[in-house]
Amino acid sequence: MDNVNLKLVIAMARTYDSLFFEVEKSLKEFELNISEFGVLEMLYHKGDQPVQKVAEKILVTSGTITYVINKLEKKDFVVRRKCNKDKRVYYVSLTEKGHDFIDYIFPKHKDFIDNLFKDISEENKIQLLENLIQLRKVLK
C-alpha cells in the first residue's frame, strides 16, 4: 500500500474526531463537555488532585483547566483549596453534589462506551489497544 503512514495518520485523525463527536454528543445529555467530564471522572476515581496534575491527565492547558474548574465550581461539583505545605499548589476535590452526580452518570457513560464498541470483538479490541500503546511509546 502506497503512503501507508500518511493514510494511517488520516485514518487515526478521522477516527478520533468521530469518536469524540459521539462522546461529546452523549455528554450533552448531562450538560457537560468532555473536559468537565474528564475532571469529574478523574476525581471520582483518583480522589483529590493538584490542579496541574488534573490538567496533565485530561490533556488540557493550565488556562483551560482553570476555566473548566471554574465552571464546575459554579455547578457546585468541585471545590479548590490551597495546599497546606506549598501555598503555590491548589487541590481540587469533588463536593458531595459532584460525587453524587458523577456516581449517577458514570455507569451510563460506561454503558454508552460499551455500546460504541459492541461490534468489535474482544480480541480485536485488545489488539488495537496494544497497537495504540506501542504507537504512543514510539512517539514519546
Image (cartoon, helix red, strand yellow):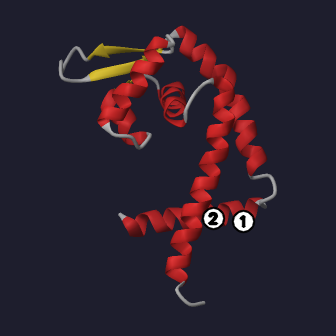
The x, y position of residue 28, in whole percent, is 64, 30
Find residue 124 and name its label. Answer: 1
Q: Within 10 Å of the Cα at label 2, are there few (<14), some (14-19), or many (20+) other Cα atoms?
A: few
Q: Which disc is residue 22 wearing?
A: none
7 lies left or right of 87: right
Query: Secondary structure under badge 2?
Result: helix
* Residue 137 to residue 38: above or below: below
> Which element carries disc 1, helix, strand or loop?
helix
Q: Is residue 3 above or below residue 19?
A: below
* Residue sitting farthest toward the right: 119
Quarter that holds the N terminus: bottom right
54 relative to 99, above or below: below
Location of the C terminus (image quadrant): bottom left
- The part of the image, by quadrant, that contains residue 7 is bottom right
Q: Where, by quadrant of the figure, is residue 93 drawn? A: top left
User: Where does the image place residue 96, in percent across and percent down from the top left?
Assistant: 54, 9
Percent x, y of residue 34: 54, 36
Q: Residue visible at 50% across and 80% down?
A: 5
**On the picture, is 103 further left or further right than 82?**
right
Instruction: Identify which residue is drawn at 39% across, 67% down.
Output: 139
Q: Amino acid at mark 2?
A: Leu
Residue 128 is marked as 2
Label pair 1/2, CB-CB below 8 angstroms: yes
Q: Residue 126: percent from the left, percent from the top?
A: 66, 61
Q: What is the C-alpha distance between the residues marked 1 and 2? A: 6 Å
